[in-house]
Amino acid sequence: MDKIKQDLMKEVADLIKQGGVVAFTGAGISVESGIPPFRGAKGLWSKYNPEEYAYIETFLRNPEKVWIMLREMYRCFSEAKPNLAHLVLAEFETKGYLEAVITQNIDSLHQKAGSKKVIELHGSGDRLVCLDCEKEYPFIEEYLKLTPYPKCKRCNKPLKPAIVFFGEPLPEKALSQAFELVKSCKVLIVIGTSGVVYPAAYLPYEAKRSGAKIIEINPEESAYTNSITDYFFKEKAGEFFKNLSFFYN
Ligand code: OAD
C-alpha cells in the first residue's frame, strides 16, 4: 500500500471509529462468497433475462419457468458462507460503530455473519410465501426437489420466495426505516452496488443531502462514484476490509 492510500485508509478508519455509521450493500458484497451479481458479464441477468424471469407478472403467469432460475439461485445460496466484508460489518456493530446494515441482498449472509440490525429492502429468500392466502413457509432445501414448483399446503397455489420481484412494492417498513437511518447517519459505507435500481438507489443521495460522508467500495465505478462519493476504494470488498484491519490493531 502506498503512502497516499495508507493515509486515506487511516482517515476512513478514524471516521468509522467515531460511530454513527450505516452500511448500504448490494450484490457485490457477496461475490467473494461465490454468489454472482445481477449485472455484468457473469451476472444473473446475463443468463436469465429479467424481462422474462424477474417480473411478478411472469411469476404469476408461468411459475414453473421462474422456479428454474430460483432453484439455481438457492443452490448458490446454500453453498455460500459470509466473507470478510460481512464479518467485519458485524464486528463494527458489536463495537458500537455501526448502527445498521441496509441491504438489497436476499441471501441472508449479513445475518449469518452475525449482524443483528439488517434492513432487507428487497425481502429475503429465507421464506416462501403463498400469493393467494399469504401463508409463509421457512425455506428448506426439500422445496427445491418439488416439481414443477413448491405449492401452498392450504390452497395448492405456487409458493414464491419472499423476495421483491420487479413490479412489486418494496416492504414499506424496511424502506421507511432505511430512509430514517440514512438521514441521521454520519457515515454511509456503500459496498458493491451499481446504484441503478430504485427506490433503493436513492438512499446514498439522501444520506449525502443530510450531511453524511460517503465511503464507497467497488472494483468498478457506480452511479455514485463521480457524483456523491467522498472516499472511493476501487477494489473488492474483501481487499478493502483486509487493508482496513491494519488500522484497527
Ligand atoms: P448489481 O449486480 O447491479 O451490481 C453489483 C456491483 O457490485 C457492481 O457495481 C460491481 O462492480 C460490484 N462488485 C462486483 N464484485 C465486487 C466485490 N468483490 N466487492 C465489491 N463490489 C463488487 O447488484 P445490485 O446493485 O445489488 O433487485 O443490484 C440491485 C438490484 O438489482 C438487486 O437487489 C436486484 C437487481 O435487479 C431485485 O431483484 C428487485
Image (tube, helix red, strand yellow):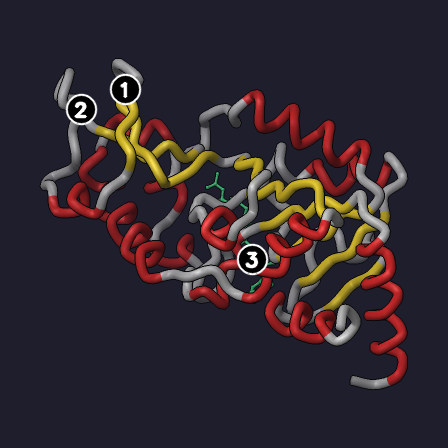
* Residue named by callout 3: 86
Q: Nearer the viewer, mark 2 or mark 3?
A: 3
The amino acid at mark 3 is His
- The residue depicted at 20 percent of the width and 28 percent of the height is 158
Q: Nearer the viewer, residue 19 or 149?
A: 19
Q: Which residue is mark 1?
A: 135
- Furthest residue in direction top, as rendered: 133
Q: Residue at x 59, y 38 (%)?
A: 117
Pointer 3 residue Cβ closer than 8 Å to ligand 1: no
Per the image, label 2 sits on a secondary structure element best described as loop
Q: Residues under labels 2 and 3: Cα distance? A: 33 Å
Mark 2, residues whose alpha carbon is within 10 Å: few (<14), some, or many (≥20)?
many
Dot 2 corresponds to which residue? 152
In this view of the protein, which residue sits in the foreground, 225 or 146?
A: 146
Q: Quadrant of the C terminus?
A: bottom right
Residue 95's spot in the image, x, y percent?
71, 52
Q: Quadrant of ligand 1?
A: bottom right
* Secondary structure of the residue carrying numbered label 3: helix
Tell me which amino acid carries mark 2.
Cys
